[in-house]
Amino acid sequence: MSNNDSNIHVLPALPYADHALEPIITANTLSFHYGKHHKTYVENLNKLLAGTELVSLSLEQVITSVAGQAEKVGIFNNAAQIWNHSFYWKSLTPEGGGEPPAEFKQMLEASFGSVEACKKELSSAAVSQFGSGWAWLVLDGSLLKVVKTSNAGLPLTMGVKPLLAIDVWEHAYYLDYQNRRADYVNAVLDKLINWEFALQNVSA
Ligand code: MN3
């Protein structure tokens, strides 16, 4: 294994300070979630890819090329979790929640009836996901939809475009909320969710 081979994928910087999401998500949670969990996925993926033909691929290419292959599930899980977490950090912002930009509000109303109805569906998907996983707002053709995935699953392999992600693995909320996943999810939707990021992703 060359040195190059072991450092292909890097942990992206958090888009805010680790205390910026308090009190909804504490610095304690972020320091473990970003500094340990996200970092470990990066380290694991680099180890798994070293010396393989996949080492030259982008993260998205790794994910789509190994998806569904039982013998490469370790690569898929670590690669997808790197992608999911980088996307989740950007789905949150200290100035989040509240009123979406007008253009995005219209899209939400066209697909769900109202912003509140979208939030309710996102919350319901996040709370009802059995075990570890993710709740997503996605663009399917011209329609916004809510989907959920288990473990490392992600919309990239489902033919829909991800707009927002909410992590519902216990490590995302347990230090702050213990078993109260609904309290974490609803606080995120009310105070942190980054509608601007969702709108940017529509045309990304
Ligand atoms: Mn996580």
Image (cartoon, rainbow, N blue to C red):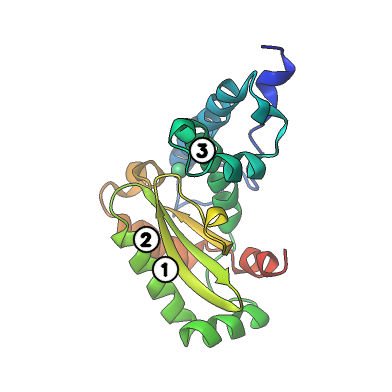
Looking at numbered disc 3 in the image, what kind of residue is underneath it? Phe
x and y, in percent, of residue 118 in the image: 45, 76
Looking at numbered disc 1 in the image, what kind of residue is underneath it? Leu
Q: Which residue is mark 2?
A: 126
Q: Which residue is mark 1?
A: 122
- For label 2, the SS is helix
Depth order, front residue of 1/102 = 1
Q: Which residue is mark 3?
A: 76
- For label 3, the SS is helix
Q: Tell me whether circle 1 and circle 2 mark residues in contact (CB < 8 Å).
A: yes
| Above or below, comparing residue 180 to residue 70 in the picture | below
| Residue 84 makes an appearance in the image | yes
Q: Residue at x 51, y 83 (%)?
A: 111
Looking at numbered disc 2 in the image, what kind of residue is underneath it? Ala
| Above or below, comparing residue 96 to residue 57 in the picture | below
Q: Residue at x 52, y 59 (%)?
A: 158
Picture quarter with the C terminus: bottom right
Q: Residue at x 31, y 55 (%)?
A: 181
Q: Nearer the viewer, mark 3 or mark 1?
A: 3
Depth order, front residue of 98/111 = 111
